[in-house]
Amino acid sequence: MDGFYRGIETSLIALSLLLGLGAFVLSERAPPRPAVTQLAVTLPMLSVTATP
């Protein structure tokens, strides 16, 4: 039974590694995004503003 769970754990680790690598490769080949000059988020009890 221990080997079964170890196999599942190993396969999940390998799957997460492959998904992360795939996301990294796809993000490198994507066209550049336009620059955001200002981002503001307002929630009922929280206000966050970010500028470059």
Image (cartoon, rainbow, N blue to C red):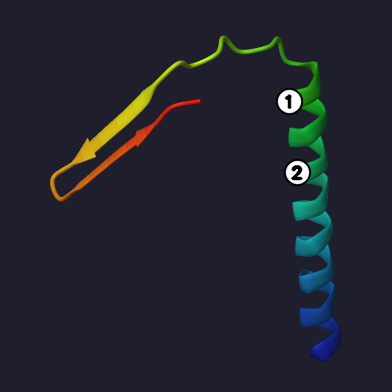
Question: SS class of the residue under badge 1?
Answer: helix
* Residue positioned 79% across, 23% down in the render: 28
Q: Residues within 10 Å of mark 1 (few under 14, many from 20)?
A: few
Q: In the rendered structure, find residue 6 and report the number of the disc placed on it.
A: none
Left or right? Give the position of 33 relative to 27: left
Q: Residue furthest front?
A: 52
Q: Residue furthest left?
A: 44
Q: Residues within 10 Å of mark 2 (few under 14, many from 20)?
A: few
For residue 7, above or below residue 33: below
Circle 1: residue type:
Ser
Left or right? Give the position of 34 relative to 41: right
Rounded to the nearest angstrom, the CA distance separating label 2 from label 1 is: 12 Å
* Residue positioned 48% across, 16% down in the render: 36
Q: Quadrant of residue 13?
A: bottom right
For residue 23, above or below residue 3: above
Instruction: Check disc 1 and report the residue beneath it.
Output: 27
Q: Nearer the viewer, mark 2 or mark 1?
A: 1
Q: Residue furthest bottom?
A: 1
For residue 49, above or below residue 7: above
Circle 2: residue type:
Leu
Instruction: Check disc 2 and report the residue beneath it.
Output: 19
Residue 15 location (% of width, % of height): 78, 53
Residue 25 location (% of width, % of height): 82, 29
Residue 46 location (% of width, % of height): 21, 48
